[in-house]
Amino acid sequence: MLDKTIPHFNVIMKRSAGVPLPRFALPEGYSFTWYVPGKEEQWAEIESSVGEFENVEQGLDYFRNEYLPFVEELKRRLLFVQNEDGEEIGTITSWWNLTGERRDPSVHWFAVKKEYQGVGVGKALVSECLNRLQLLEGDRNIFLHTQTWSYKAIGLYLNAGFEILSYESFAHYKNDYDIALPILKTVLHKPFR
């Protein structure tokens, strides 16, 4: 869930090549499943449920424009978690961004429905995403763009070996480190630089 009670600023994170990959299994009763055509609505539902989009239709429009042109890549990069009833309750994407001519492995669109947060689903999703990125892209630096509103996810990313970058960025993302850091220091429990 995004916390929109705090100011919104961009945060850029990097996980350096060579850092050992985290290994977190899903809790009992949950399972991973990969994207297949037709699961766009489940993705949009999860993302809108945490506040990333105002509604499912807005999420679907984004998905159709940004991801559907790469349907074969989606099948090996867009991961869901299902509950015991087969309902998709979490998602993450092992994607990439172009920084000039350089293709940077990156984490996209990580979300877990509110009622399933705090039980280990998110840690397992991030772990599986990082393992997938290393498999597909090699042992390289992995980037992600997030925001102060997602400070709970930032804490999870820090535990998975990411660092908050003070000046670097990737792709087209703005880095608001100087104004984001004081906010993060008030809401994060883990010490960081």
Image (tube, rainbow, N blue to C red):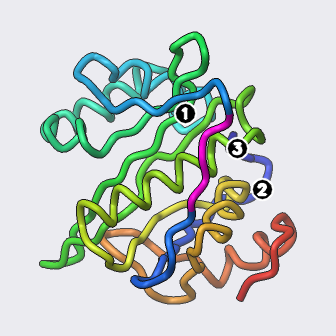
Find residue 90 and name its label: 1
Question: Which quadrant would residue 79 be assigned to in this image?
Answer: top left
In front: 5, or 48? 48
The amino acid pointed to by label 3 is Gly
Residue type at numbered disc 2: Ile
Element on which disc 1 rests: strand
Magenta-colored stretch includes residue 24: yes
| Numbered circle sitting on residue 6 | 2
C-alpha separation, residue under disc 1 versus residue under disc 3: 11 Å
Establish if 128 lies above or below 176: above
Q: Nearer the viewer, mark 1 or mark 2?
A: 1
- The answer to which quarter of the image holds residue 164 is bottom right
Q: Earlier in the sequence, mark 1 or mark 3?
A: 1
Question: Which residues fall within the magenta stretch?
Answer: 23-27
Q: Residue at x 67, y 36 (%)?
A: 27
In which quadrant of the rendered image does the N terminus lie?
Answer: top right
Which residue is more in the foreground, 122 or 182?
Answer: 122
Name the amino acid, label 1: Gly
Please give the label number shown on residue 179: none
User: Residue 67, image x and y in percent?
Assistant: 24, 39
Which residue is found at the position 23% from the left and 36% from the top?
A: 75
Residue at (32% x, 69% y) in the render: 172
Q: Earlier in the sequence, mark 2 or mark 3?
A: 2
Residue that label 3 marks: 120
Callout 2: helix, strand or loop? Answer: loop
Q: Is residue 117 above or below residue 58?
A: below
Give how far apart the Cα atoms at labels 2 and 3 are.
25 Å
- Residue at the limit of the structure toward the top, as seen here: 85
